Image: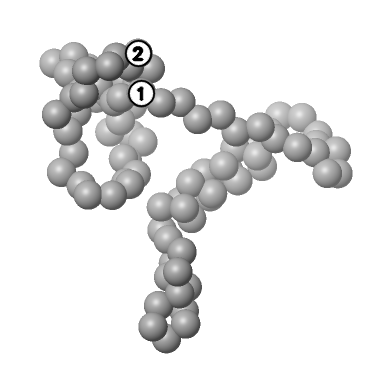
Amino acid sequence: MEPSFDNVIPYNDVVMRVADRIYEFLIQCPFELDQGSSWEIEAKLGRIVDKRGNERILIPVESETIIREDWARDNTRFDSKMGMVRDS
């Protein structure tokens, strides 16, 4: 991120929350890690679908956001099938 006019790099809360979540998974790892171990992080493209209506959820946000895990687990599912038709 670009520094602000007073040369301070802004804090990005989304990046920090994702990094914290990855760290939580790493420290809960059930086996011993060797010094200098490498991890591979996989990202998937898809859409978040409402379990009740089986439609893509639309969230009125203009940038990346983090959905509460408890709400997402109970109300949504991830659909990795993506077609050429753009959802509105």
Query: Which residue is the extreme one toward the bottom?
Result: 6
The residue shown at (66%, 32%) is 40
Q: Residue furthest front?
A: 84
Q: Are marks 1 and 2 in contact (CB under 8 Å)?
A: yes
- From this view, report whether residue 39 is shown above or below residue 51: below
Q: Secondary structure at mark 1?
A: loop
Q: Quadrant of residue 58?
A: top left
Residue that badge 2 annotates = 81
Answer few, some or many: residues within 10 Å of disc 2's Cα (few below 14, many 20 plus, some between 14 and 19): few
Which of these two is toward me, 80 or 29? 80
Q: Evaluate whether residue 52 shows in this view.
A: no
Real-space CA distance between mark 1 and mark 2, rounded to the nearest whole angstrom: 6 Å
Of residue 3 and residue 37, the one placed in the foreground of this image is 3
Q: Position of residue 80 (x, y in %)?
A: 38, 17
Q: Which residue is mark 1?
A: 46
Percent across and percent down for residue 62 are 22, 49
Q: Position of residue 37 (x, y in %)?
A: 80, 38
Question: What's the amino acid at mark 1?
Answer: Gly
Residue type at mark 2 is: Lys
Left or right position of 24 against 47:
right
Numbered disc 2: secondary structure: loop
Q: Quadrant of residue 22?
A: top right
Is residue 35 left or right of 2 when viewed as pictured? right
